[in-house]
Amino acid sequence: MAKKKAFTPLLYLVSIVIFFSWWISLLFQKSLESWVTNWWNTRQSETFLNDIEERVF
């Protein structure tokens, strides 16, 4: 019985650690994805404007 009482808090702790690590990973992935998308769109528009400028001049 004593082993079961010691095992339960350990199980909760492991569950919390797994949940928070998954949550932090997901948050990091989403923020990185938005940063890369923003960077990519910015670079594309600069290239497009430079291409138009070359044609005009």
Image (cartoon, grey):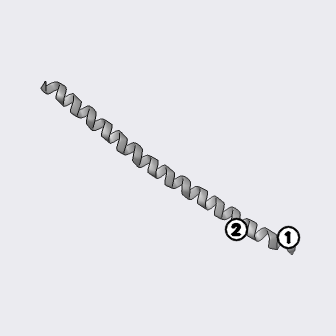
Residue at the spot 60% in from the left edge and 56% down from the top edge: 21
Image spot of residue 33 (x, y percent): 43, 47
Q: x%, y% of residue 22?
A: 58, 56
Which residue, given by chain and number where applicable, does mark 2 sit on?
12
Instruction: Give the image location of residue 36, x and y in percent.
Output: 41, 43
Query: In terms of sequence position, does the residue under pointer 2 or pointer 1 come before the other?
Result: 1
Residue 54 vertical placement versus 17 (above, below): above
Q: What element does badge 1 sit on?
A: helix
Q: Residue at x 86, y 73 (%)?
A: 2
Kind of residue at disc 1: Lys
Q: Is residue 3 left or right of residue 51?
A: right
Alpha carbon separation for disc pair 2 and 1: 15 Å
Mark carried by residue 3: 1
Is 8 situated left or right of 36 in this image?
Answer: right
Q: Residues within 10 Å of mark 2 (few under 14, many from 20)?
A: few
Callout 1 crowding tier (Cα within 10 Å): few <14, some 14–19, many ≥20 = few
Position of 9 relative to 32 (above/below) = below
Q: Helix, strand, or loop for circle 2? A: helix
In the picture, which quadrant includes the N terminus? bottom right
Q: Name the residue: 75% across, 66% down.
A: 10
The image quadrant of residue 41 is top left
Q: Position of residue 55 (x, y in %)?
A: 16, 25
Q: Judge from the rendering whether residue 48 lies leftward or rightward of residue 57; answer left or right.
A: right
Name the amino acid, label 2: Tyr
